[in-house]
Amino acid sequence: MSWGSPGTKIFMTEPKPAGMNKMHAALMLTGIIFLLIFAGCSSPQPPKNPVNATPAPSQNVPCMEKACFIAAANDCKDLNVTIREDIGTFRYSSSPDCIFKKTLVSMNGTESREIRNLLEGKNMTCIYTKGKFDQRLVTTLMGGIEYCRGELKDNLARLVIFS
């Protein structure tokens, strides 16, 4: 009796229990999910605080917007700019020594008198490295203030603690 062509080996196996195929499928699916998660975690991450590609101001063109100021501060240029925002008016300055200063000049009238007294006119000074200016100092109220000091930083911290 011939079961296939010469040289063909035929293996006889016992039938698998019904749950084994489902278990193998579940294990393979779990492995694929872990592989996808690992691949996502190990892929290169974009920089946390990329500096916008807006060119730093020339001596003839005034800098009146955040992106322009951020580019100038990243190069440690001597620049002062006052910008009106949702919360109020801020004055930002950078220096050739890579020192950034943020002043909350005035707040909008929607804030309580207590909050306004606590924050208006207060400032903080931050030291940074040329080429590594943290744009969150300009784009957020509290982001990037780890290397800063001053009444504005201290009073913002008090507000967060007591909120």
Image: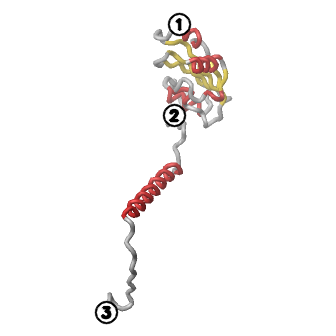
Residue 143 horizontal side relative to residue 84, left or right: right
Q: Quadrant of residue 151?
A: top right
Query: How far apart in space, not on screen, are marks 1 and 3 (Cα)?
Result: 101 Å
Q: Which residue is mark 1?
A: 113
Q: Which residue is mark 2?
A: 55
In the picture, the quarter occupied by the C terminus is: top right
**Given the image, on which type of amino acid does mark 2 rest?**
Pro
Task: In the rendered view, tell whether residue 34 sits above or below residue 49.
Answer: below
Picture residue at 60% right of the left edge, 20% below the top: 161
User: Residue 73 appears at what percent x and percent y?
Assistant: 59, 30
- Mark nearest the camera among 2 and 3 is 3
Query: How far apart in space, not on screen, are marks 1 and 2 (Cα)?
Result: 39 Å
**First of labels 2, 3 by sequence position:** 3
- Mark nearest the camera among 1 and 2 is 1
Mark 3, other Cα within 10 Å: few <14 / some 14–19 / many ≥20: few
User: Residue 11 appears at what percent x and percent y?
Assistant: 40, 81
Q: Which residue is mark 3?
A: 1
Query: How far apart in space, not on screen, are marks 2 and 3 (Cα)?
Result: 85 Å
Q: Quadrant of residue 15?
A: bottom left
User: Residue 94 appears at what percent x and percent y?
Assistant: 61, 25
Say which element carries label 2: loop
**First of labels 1, 3 by sequence position:** 3
Label 1 with label 3: CB-CB less than 8 Å: no
Residue 108 horizontal side relative to residue 19, left or right: right
User: Residue 79 appears at what percent x and percent y?
Assistant: 59, 24
User: Across the whole image, how many numbered discs are drawn on residues?
Assistant: 3
**Given the image, on which type of amino acid does mark 1 rest?**
Arg
Q: Nearer the viewer, residue 16 or 106?
A: 16
